[in-house]
């Protein structure tokens, strides 16, 4: 039985420093967008831990949606 590598998805947590580097947004902009519901929410990494992170796939999807919206506006304009 072989496993299709396309079906295997890697899950990875990324911290604020990487999120800001990848998106170009500041910390305060990210937290504001989370509050507005326009950016993925971070996850708590443990019950007793204050450590928070985002799923890399959530950030990738958000970035893809921004790019798609830009492309759509180019087509409509």
Image (cartoon, rainbow, N blue to C red):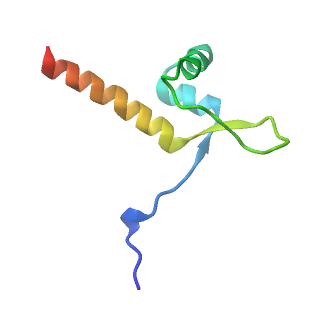
Q: Quadrant of the N terminus?
A: bottom left
> Residue at the location (39% across, 67% down)?
5
| 18 over 26 or under it: above or below | below
Residue at position x 56%, y 30% from top? Answer: 19
Left/right placement of residue 42 relative to residue 64 reads right
Residue 76 occupies which quadrant of the picture?
A: top left
- Residue 29: image quadrant is top right
Left or right, residue 36 beside residue 53: left
Q: Quadrant of the C terminus?
A: top left
| Quadrant of residue 42 within the rendered picture | top right
Instruction: Identify which residue is drawn at 52% across, 19% down.
Output: 25
Where's residue 52, x and y in %? 70, 35
Most foreground residue, 22 or 75: 75
Query: Most extreme residue toward the bottom, as rendered?
Result: 1
Residue 32: x, y in percent?
A: 58, 15
Q: Work out whether residue 19 or residue 65 is closer to the camera in this orientation and state it.
A: 65
* Residue at horizontal 58 percent and vertical 49 percent from the top: 12
Q: Position of residue 14 (x, y in %)?
A: 60, 40
Total marks shown come to 0
């Amino acid at each position: 039985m072989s496993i299709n590598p396309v079906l295997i998805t890697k899950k990875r947590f990324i911290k604020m420093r990487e999120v800001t580097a990848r998106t170009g947004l500041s910390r305060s902009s990210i937290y504001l967008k989370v509050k507005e519901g326009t950016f993925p929410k971070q996850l708590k990494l443990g019950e007793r831990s204050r450590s928070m992170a985002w799923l890399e796939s959530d950030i990738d999807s958000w970035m893809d949606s921004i790019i798609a919206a830009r492309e759509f506006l180019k087509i409509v304009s």
